Each structure stands twice: as structure tokens, then as C-alpha cells.
Image (cartoon, rainbow, N blue to C red):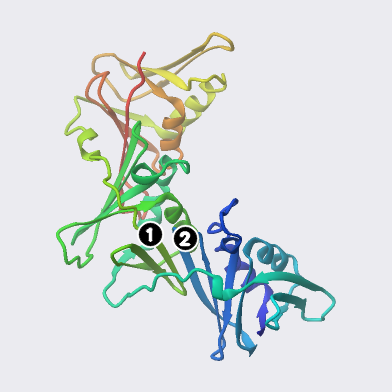
Amino acid sequence: MNIIVEKSRFTNELRLFQGIFEKKSLKDILENIKLTAREDGTLELVATDLEIGLMSTIQVTVNEPGTFTVNGKDLYELISKMPEGNVEISENNDLQVIIMNERKTSKYKLLGLQSSDYPVLPEADFSSHISISVKNLTSIINKSYYIISPEMKFTLGGALMSITNDRFDMAATDSHRLAYLNYMGSFNVQEETMSFIVSRKTLVELLKICEEGEVQFAFDKNNLFFKYNNMVLSSRIIDQKFPNYKAVIPDKAEYEVIVDKEELLQTVRRILIFKARNNGVLFRFGDNKLVLERTTPEKGEGYDELSIEYNSKPVKVAFNGNFIIDFLTHVDTEKIQIDIIDEDSSFIFKPVGFQDGDDVKFIYVVMPLNI
């Protein structure tokens, strides 16, 4: 195999694959990326961790077709540090990958593995696909993926994606809080509702590869497929039952609070400077005033107040301060609304209005801490 490819173009493509490789893989070959050069001048790149896979195709100069696999992170690091211009990559069926710059003043050799041993990605059929707005999809993922812990598996290790003829929903929870988002559209769904649990890693990788326009979505019995431009991301379906998240979303609120997002964010950050095992912050809602208090016996105590729009009965509640920061850092509006039923029920946080060009509805449900 012998190809010539422009260094910066190849670097940008390889960068999108770096999240696929696991730091500690059970099989050495899963740390590799598979490259296949074809006579039609295309280079196919494939990487997988057996749970998700990514494939892309780019145009290169193919002097000799062929295929090999090589460590994906090493290849990316080397290509990104090569001199600008074209890079020549060759392999002569000896599993030794030679990489040279255009002037042949830099020459490196990487050891590969047999491409025949590389796992085969599931084949996607996009003949009957659903088109999803990249702008809305990335907005939804950005506002929900951080709730899902990378250590979590099965139901809580992913978000529930549901699609009907006119609505796209996503819900993510860690059992202490919930992010629920949706937007209205036309999706031409055959069933009444299609629902899938999408892994956190899949959501993060979608954020990396999608920029604008639309992404095509398809699925089979075991896999989900997302196609964006020259890339196809495949993901195994998490075959578990997602918690009944709708049961924790209150039907209506007794009281509503309007508060400046940035002021509340800076206040919560300030009061959390006392590091302790417990990140609890006491919120006291009063007459057009919100007081935040935090006491840590080993460090000290803090008191902060800010103006709000609220004129109902006093409410005292404690939240994990980091949960509130997570919400506030993923909201783009100037004001947020807090819906209150009582001190013991879940509280709903949501942006007031929409960001320019954003059609996504977002609510964030937080369980209070025991005071």
C-alpha cells in the first residue's frame, strides 16, 4: 500500500477518531485504526471499541491499494507533528508502516497488526433514514450528556432518545437529577414512538463529528447508525429498560422564581470555595430575595444573597451546588425560572425563552438534599 495525503487534512480526520480508542483495551488491535486504500482514490478509516465504531472516507492519492492497522493514537500524534505539506504512507505486507514527509527529510516506522484480525463494523442501511437537525441535536446532547457518568453502565449509562412523527425527545438521569429536552419537527416515523438508549460515549462522539446541516439516523435490530457527511458512527443498542423519568416531572408548580442566570452561577461558585465532602448549599427563597448559605465545620461558612422575582411564602431547601452549576453552565439565556411545589418535592429549573435560533425545550429536575 502506498498513498499520499495532505498532512493537515489527514490530521483533522484522525483527530475525530481519538475518542474511540480506550485507554486500556483488552485487545491490542482495538487500540489500532484500520486504513484501506482503494483504486478509486479513496482511503477508508475505521476504529471501534466493540461498543461503538466510526468509519470515514476521504480522497487521497493512491499509488498502490492495500490495507493495514496501526496504533491510532501514535499515528495521529506523528502525523500532526510532521512538517506541513503532503505525507507519504506505505506498507509492503510486512506490517511495517513507513511515514515520510514530502521532502523525505523525516522518516518514521510504525509497527502494525494484521488487518484481517480487525473487527468488522455492522453495515448500515440508510435507504430509510430519519433526518435530524445537527443544530438541535448538538444542543440537546450538550445539555444532557454531562449527567451521565462514564462509570455508569446499562440504563443510567446512556440517554433515552425517543422519536415520534413530530417530536424528538431525549432524557438523561443519574437518579438524583434529570435533564429532559425536546424539539418539534417532521421525522416520518413508521411507529408511534421509537425509543433507544444511546450510550454517553456515542453522544460525546456525535458532538465531535457534527457541525451543521443534518445527520441521518438509521437502526437495525442491534445497532444505531448516525451518518454525517463522509462519516458513519455506529453504536450498539443498550438493551435495558430506562427508568420512568416522566414520573419525577411535576405536572404543575405552586410557585415560580425568576433569577439572573449569570448572577446565580457566580454566587454558587463563590459559596462552594469551601471544599468539603458534601457539596450541599442551602437556598432560602424569600420576598424578592434568594439567600445562599453553606457551613463547613472544618473550613468556615458563607452567606450570599441576590435579588430575584418572587413574592410567595418563604421556602428553604438544600441542593448539591455542583448540580446547579452544571445546569447554569449549559444554559444560554439571561434568565432562568425555578418551579417550586414544596420543600420536599423535585424542583424544576429551566431557561426563560430560547437562545437565538435554538428550538429546543429544556427542563432540569433536581431532587433536594435532606437538611
161 left or right, relative to 1: left
Between residue 52 and residue 371, name the one nearer to us. Answer: 52
**Count of numbered marks:** 2
The residue lying furthest to the right in this view is 105
Residue occupying image coordinates x 74% and y 73%: 84
241 left or right, relative to 205: left
Above or below, comparing residue 311 to residue 62 in the picture = above
Residue, disc 1 = 236
Marks 2 and 1, how far apart in space?
8 Å
Q: Which quadrant, please, contains the C terminus?
A: top left
Q: For residue 146, what is the image quadrant?
A: top left
Q: Residues within 10 Å of mark 2 (few under 14, many from 20)?
A: some
Say the numbered circle drawn on residue 50.
Answer: 2
Q: Secondary structure at mark 2?
A: loop
Instruction: Give x and y (percent) for residue 264.
Output: 44, 28
Residue occupying image coordinates x 37% and y 48%: 158
Q: For residue 331, what is the image quadrant?
A: top left
Q: Is mark 2 in CB contact (under 8 Å) with mark 1?
A: yes
